[in-house]
Amino acid sequence: MKQPFTLGFGALALLSGCITPVDEAESGPKTELLVKSLESEYGCYNTARQMHINLSETYTVIHSQAQFDQLVSGSCRPQIDFATYDLVIGKKGLPNSEAGIHYTLQREYETKRVVLHVVFTLSMTTEAPNVTYHALVPKLAASEGVDVKIEMKK
């Protein structure tokens, strides 16, 4: 009687390692990509408040210096290497002031999309700013699109 129980339990244990969580199976394989900023690459500072673009609760992808010069204003005016990067830039209204912004970038192979995850860490102040976020992403192929997913943490 011990053998069937032991054998069944062993088979169950082996099969449990083969189960893929539902969220991974639905979204498909992803690759983490290097994301950079105007602060790290060009020495800009406080771009969340010092850089401006005429957007509200959305984002755009800038592919050239001419587009950047036309659309973006503020104290940060670098000559960006658009042969290497594209600039994803957007505006977001926050319920509180931000204490920091963290970016991660992934390529989803099934959808052929690049996904920029933007995480705002909120401070305790009651100010509700409309801040600019941005990321320098590896130059996108003509067929690639970018999605931005925003999360807020306290």
Image (tube, rainbow, N blue to C red):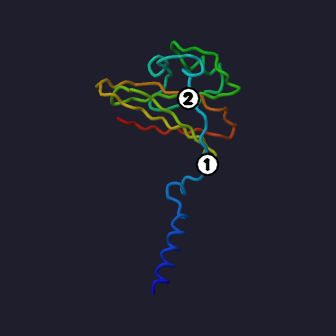
Tally of numbered tags: 2
Q: Residue at x 69, y 37 (%)?
A: 141
Residue 31 place in picture, x, y as percent: 61, 44
Residue 81 falls in which quadrant of the image? top right
The label on residue 88 is none
Residue 131 place in picture, x, y as percent: 43, 25
Q: Secondary structure at mark 2?
A: strand
The residue indicated by pointer 2 is 135
Amino acid found under the numbered disc labelled 1: Thr
Residue 88 falls in which quadrant of the image? top right
Q: Viewer-nearest of labels 2 and 1? A: 2
Amino acid found under the numbered disc labelled 2: Ala
Rounded to the nearest angstrom, the CA distance separating label 2 from label 1 is: 21 Å
21 versus 86 height, above or below: below
Disc 1 packing (10 Å; few <14; some 14–19; many ≥20): few
102 to the left or right of 42: left
Which quarter shows the C terminus?
top left
Q: Residue at x 39, y 26 (%)?
A: 99
| Nearer the observer, 106 or 149 | 106
| Residue at the far bottom in the pictured view | 1
Which quarter shows the N terminus?
bottom left
- Label 2 vs 1, first from the N-terminus: 1
Residue 36 place in picture, x, y as percent: 58, 28
Residue 3 place in picture, x, y as percent: 49, 83
Q: Secondary structure at mark 1?
A: loop
The residue indicated by pointer 1 is 111
111 versus 146 height, above or below: below
